[in-house]
Amino acid sequence: MKNIFNQLHSEEILNRIDKLSPNSKPQWGKMDVAQMLAHCSSFQDIAMGHSFPARGWLGILIGNFVKPIFYNDKPLAQNMSTIPTILIVDEKEFETEKEKLKQKIITFQNNGSEKCTTHPHPFFGKLTSKQWGKGIYKHLDHHLKQFGV
């Protein structure tokens, strides 16, 4: 499984983000491309320890049992539900969101696994930095595939 803390894997994601355009259309889901970028950026904030969404009851109940979904080799399911606080429904500006996400990925990768949050994931609970690194890559890969890159 690829890991965002690996510079080659991080560069691959950044190159794929650069292939997006304001006209990129989703193959599934409700977000447009700018909203998707904002969503991924908000998710980076959680992994970087800048945002701390509360754990929902379902996550508390089953999150620990299903957390390998986040970092294993199997692709994430299309139209999977998301953390309510990072569900983006308002209009966003593509170039702003694209640059914001790229900078957060670069910072996260440069900071390394030792600066990854120790705060629990809002659904899956406590994760190691290695699990976060794999999960962040997998989440970004999922949404980039959603938009055909």
Image (cartoon, rainbow, N blue to C red):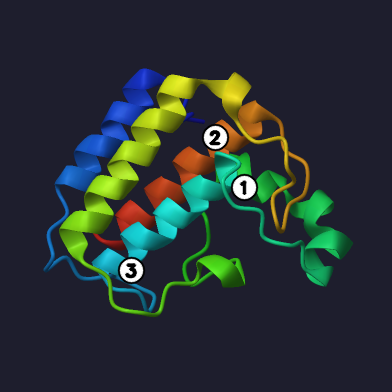
Task: Residue type at mark 2: give it.
Answer: Lys
Element type at marker 1?
A: helix
Residue for badge 2 = 134
Left or right of 59? Residue 147 is left
**On the image, which quarter does residue 128 sit in?**
top right
Mark 1, other Cα within 10 Å: few <14 / some 14–19 / many ≥20:
many
Image coordinates of residue 65 in percent, x first then y, are 83, 51
* Mark toward the start of the polypeptide (2 vs 3): 3
Residue for badge 3 = 35
Front-most of residues 11 and 116? 116
Task: Residue type at mark 3: give it.
Answer: Gln
CA–CA distance between discs 2 and 3?
23 Å
Q: Which of marks 2 and 3 is in front?
A: 3
Front-most of residues 90 and 29? 90
Image coordinates of residue 104 in percent, x first then y, are 38, 39
Residue for badge 1 = 70
- Residue extending farthest to the front is 50
* Mark toward the start of the polypeptide (1 vs 2): 1
CA–CA distance between discs 1 and 2?
8 Å
Element type at marker 3?
A: helix
The answer to whether the residue labelled 1 contacts the one labelled 2, judged by CB atoms less than 8 Å apart, is: yes
Left or right of 3? Residue 30 is left
Vertical side of 82 occupied by 42: above or below: above
Front-most of residues 57 and 111? 111
* Mark toward the start of the polypeptide (1 vs 3): 3
Mark 3, other Cα within 10 Å: few <14 / some 14–19 / many ≥20:
many
Name which residue lies at 57% across and 42% down: 47
Image coordinates of residue 28 in percent, x first then y, are 35, 73
Front-most of residues 145 and 33? 33
CA–CA distance between discs 1 and 3?
21 Å
